[in-house]
Image (cartoon, helix red, strand yellow):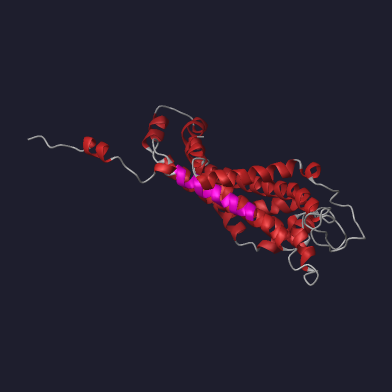
Amino acid sequence: MLTLRRALRLRSARLSAVVLVVVAVAAVLGHRLAPLDPLAQDSRHLLSGPTAGHLLGTDSLGRDVLSRLVAGTGSSLVATLEAVGAALVVGVALGVGSLWLGRGYEWTSLRFIDALQTLPYVVFVVAVVGVLGNGLTQAMIAIGLLYSPVFFRVSRAASLTLLRAQYVEAAELFGAGRLWILRTHLWSKILPTIAVTAAQAGAECLLAVQSLSFLGIGVQPPAPTWGGMLADDLGFLAQQPWAPFIPALAIMITVGALNAVADAVSDSADLPVDASPTAAGTADPVQEVSDAAVPVR
């Protein structure tokens, strides 16, 4: 929480947080906030430009673009959260457990992560979807498995550094259990690192989700998604050359906000306890003089 409060002192973090809150509200209340039915077709207004009745125009079937953009936020955000959640659970569990559950578990987890890193991205997702069915959850599980090595490496490296700390060794000498040490000493230390990784992975997973939607994997038409809207608009560039920029801009703004939050949390986690991001790198010359060591003659 302290790291989060430090991060929110940064202007970029506050602006990005506002963007993410707007995206979250649109995801939860998308169908209520949409001015029109995102699936309703108007054959009298096909590929029309922005008007009073359709602020962002209509697509090739006469559906309101603004309504589909707002309604598609929910599926995009849910898919991203599912992918990040699967990657976090698998990666952190294997990464932290590889240091505590013996050499056999460590060797098995390392080989499993190495195998995941060798899998081709699109081929693996298509294979999982082909076996389990073309659905949102199935595709997100596949993406989560492919991104779990990132959380594995981060959580393992952070835990390995803290595992050799003197206070952890002292707790073990006094008979503290591994779960108690993990809950009391390690988890609070590695949580900021995992949070930064989750924000960065969220941006990458969002791009992956929209890429799969663009290819028709995951959310099926006519359900609105940003990637699906982008795929539909590319087929009518001659009539609406500006249309693909609408869903692309939504993707770019959301991904940029996630990366900005990750950078702010990362910078704040590196500061000392009594420092703030806005005052980092500054010092009080009077305090430096008073703290200077004066040799005794």
In screen coordinates, is 217 left or right of 158? right
Residue at 26% of width from left, 41% of height from top?
Answer: 285
Q: Is residue 104 visible?
A: no
Relative image position of residue 195 (x, y in whole percent): 55, 43
Query: What's the magenta region?
Result: 253-269
Query: Is 184 drawn above or below residue 122 in the view shown?
Result: above
Q: Residue furthest front?
A: 52
Q: Residue furthest bottom?
A: 238
Q: Going 65% across and 54% down the picture, which residue do you hit?
A: 205
- Residue 184, x across and y down, in percent: 48, 31
Q: Is residue 195 above or below residue 68?
A: above
Residue 208 magenta-highlighted: no
Depth check: 6 or 10 in front? 10
> Which x, y percent locates residue 213?
75, 58
The C terminus: image quadrant: top left
Instruction: Choose between 161 and 265: the one closer to the eye.
Output: 265
Residue at the left extreme of this rendering: 297
Q: Is residue 39 visible?
A: yes
The image shows residue 78 at horizontal and vertical percentages of 72, 46
> Looking at the image, which residue sits at the far right?
43
- In the rendered image, residue 259 lying in the magenta stretch gets the answer yes
The number of numbered discs placed on residues in the rendered structure image is: 0
For residue 232, what is the image quadrant?
bottom right
Per the picture, the main secondary structure of the magenta-coloured stretch is: helix
